[in-house]
Amino acid sequence: MSKFLKAFLFVSLVFAPFAASAVTVASWGGAYTESQQKAYADTYSDPGSIVFENYNGGLGEVRAQVESGNVTWDLVDVLPSDAITGCDEGLFEDISSEIASMGVPGPDGESIAEDMEANGLNYHSGWDCCVPQIFWTYVVFYDPDAFPGEKPDSMADFFDVEKFPGKRGIHTWADGIIQKALVADGVAPNAVPTVFANQTGAIDRAFEVMDKIKDHVVFWSAGSQPLELVKSGEVVMAVAYNGRVGAANLAEGENFEYIWEGQVLDQEYLCLTTGSPNREAALDFMMHASSPESQAEQAKYITYGPMRASGIPIIEANEPWGPGGVDIMPHMPNTPERLKVSIVNDPQWWSDNGAEISERYSAWMGN
Amino acid sequence: MPIGDMLFRSVDDSQINGVFPNTFNEYKKWDKEKDVLPPEEVYKALFEELAYGEKIQIGRALTRMNYSKSGWKSLIKTTSRQIKKAVKKDELPNNYKEFLISANEKWADPTFWYAMGQMVNNTTPIYYWNALDRTYDQDQNVVMQDEKRRIYIKTWIKTLKISVYVTIFCLILGFPVAHLLANLPLRYSNLLMIFVLLPFWTSLLVRTTAWIVMLQQNGVINGILVWLGILSDDGRLQLVYNETGTLIAMTQILLPFMILPLYSVMRVIPKSHMRAAQNLGAKPATAFWRVYLPQTIPGMSAGGLLVFVLAIGYFITPELVGGKDGKLIGHWIAYHLKTTLNWGLCAALGAILLGVMLIFYWLYNKIVGIDNIKLG
């Protein structure tokens, strides 16, 4: 065996344990993961120990890893309904006691759970395995130049093609649009989840409202598309992820207006995979990532809102918070006033009904 | 092996049967004619299996139960909590039926109990029925799915239709190109070959996005047509975010898979054959039709099968350019794999897809013969 090979083997044996001890975080990639890198990993005591990997969401890969016993992702960034299912199925580890004892408290001693409740969230089983990350929302936006006269400012306007002619950009799945339809029909935004959960026929009602604009819709399926649709004039208004609109306004010099009424707030959680090879280090990083400071820091790089309510005052007090001296608060979805006109998604209801509604929505699109 | 695993998963229902064996046993004794709700024994068995079962196994079972009817998940979860509380306090109920119904009134809703009938056996054909827009009624007879939820048959037809069209378009467009490539002197044909291969090596997403830019209403093609005066400014064509866009983009993306096998077959057809045919008195068209074309069949079949097989499983391109028509069967397989975790339905959809391919393969073998396929 050549000396070089021996040296190489020796080095890899010595360093392999270190290499393996990096905490692997599976996340969505793009600008979002970049903001996590900057706000969570770069501010962490040992930035080099955190490695981000991209995935496309869903629990398919996590289930495959846990079932086969070959777990490579320590932490996974998931949507709330996946947090619930993953926690119920044991794909994520129940760490409720660790979260309670190790979680970083807010300035007035608020716990993680208290902070989330202050944001209008209700407990679900995902909270046992996961820590909160950000609020992202389905928000309607438009280019003010497209409306020289009166400008739309409500969901009723969005669903009214006579008052505001022109096409609308809507995504190809149901979540985020059927709630808006109810708001357009007169339901108070905060009440929408309870109406869906408790009133029979609420879903039919939403589809009837959507029928009114169906012939005026361009359907999109990737997050960048609604911005292109509005920019190119293909549609006059579109539903989009607010982070994309914020980035266009802040970084690309666009001047898009938001219609905050009827925005659908959804959430992201960071969950610990069962059998994580670096459990302790991963837990420690989770607590850092869910501190109010880290979450406020993240708003600098992407305009998603901190799920820790105590993160908002940090941003407010330190404006201009954004890079290059721009104010961030105009783009934050979960300020107290905006929360009053928002729908906070009920993930438990979606994990019960999501499959059925998604089939129904597809049937509706296809007809 | 993976195919075997997939076929097995498409009928397997043993996980949930391992979690609720007694409940399902008692359930089978329930006479639906006589009693509206199942007998006390069923409620008792369910209570016990929820109280002493393994939490993770129950969690997995819930995911499965939810496929049969929306709402199972939270029903079992709220009930479990009540049961755990009662067991902790050592207060076992005298009447399990009353206890469960007071824990959650849905236990008095027979439709949940009917839905349970779908899962009481270790193997089940239900996933296949679901994949064809069918479900069970209360007596386990196969019936059509609720009209508002019927999507799979439509999607199957759409997928097949698009795949067949794309294959035909690729053949129509690819044949002349391959013919040209095969008959030009080598240095020109090599240059042209680069034009075929260059897009082939470009990322799929880049090409798809490029098509959006070209086809959208304020895009390149509509722009040129309006500039030439062929279209009026309000009469711009809707070329993308519908089926047209899907067909155009998929045809362009899959075209090299048709050209390359055709080219390699055409290159080895001696040019003397056409000349000989014409020498013997055939008109050029006849010579082409009777002499040249039959010799290209192996290339056409290879290209056609390749394009068809790729097209039938496509989902990223249609999803991006297809708008409301962009959800082909591949989309639903991915959706159930990742979002609903309904791997049984996934496997059933995959198995049907495999079956469709085998049928086409068999048809092809009957018509053309499987030995008659050549990549070069």
Image (cartoon, coloured by chain):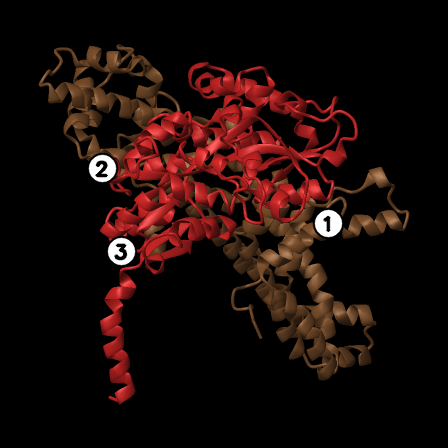
Chain colours: A red, B brown
Same-chain status of marks 1 and 2: no
A270 up-or-down from B291: above or below: above
B142 up-or-down from A35: above or below: above
Q: Nearer the viewer, residue B316 or B185?
A: B316
Residue assigned mark 1: B215
Q: Nearer the viewer, residue A172 or A117?
A: A117
Q: Nearer the viewer, residue A294 or A218?
A: A294
Rendered location of residue B45, percent (x, y): 16, 23
- Answer few, some or many: residues within 10 Å of disc 3's Cα (few below 14, many 20 plus, some between 14 and 19): few
A322 up-or-down from A158: above or below: below
Kindly identify the residue that appears in the image at 28 percent across and 25 percent down.
Answer: B76
Type of amino acid under label 3: Asn
Label whose residue precedes the other's in the sequence (2 or 3): 3
Type of amino acid under label 1: Leu
The kind of secondary structure element at disc 2 is helix
Q: Nearer the viewer, residue A7 or B281?
A: A7
| Residue at the limit of the structure toward the left, as seen here | B90
Q: Nearer the viewer, mark 2 or mark 3?
A: 2
Rendered location of residue B374, percent (x, y): 56, 71
Q: Label 1, label 3: how many angstroms apart (C-alpha)?
A: 45 Å
Asked whether residue B13 is in view, the answer is yes
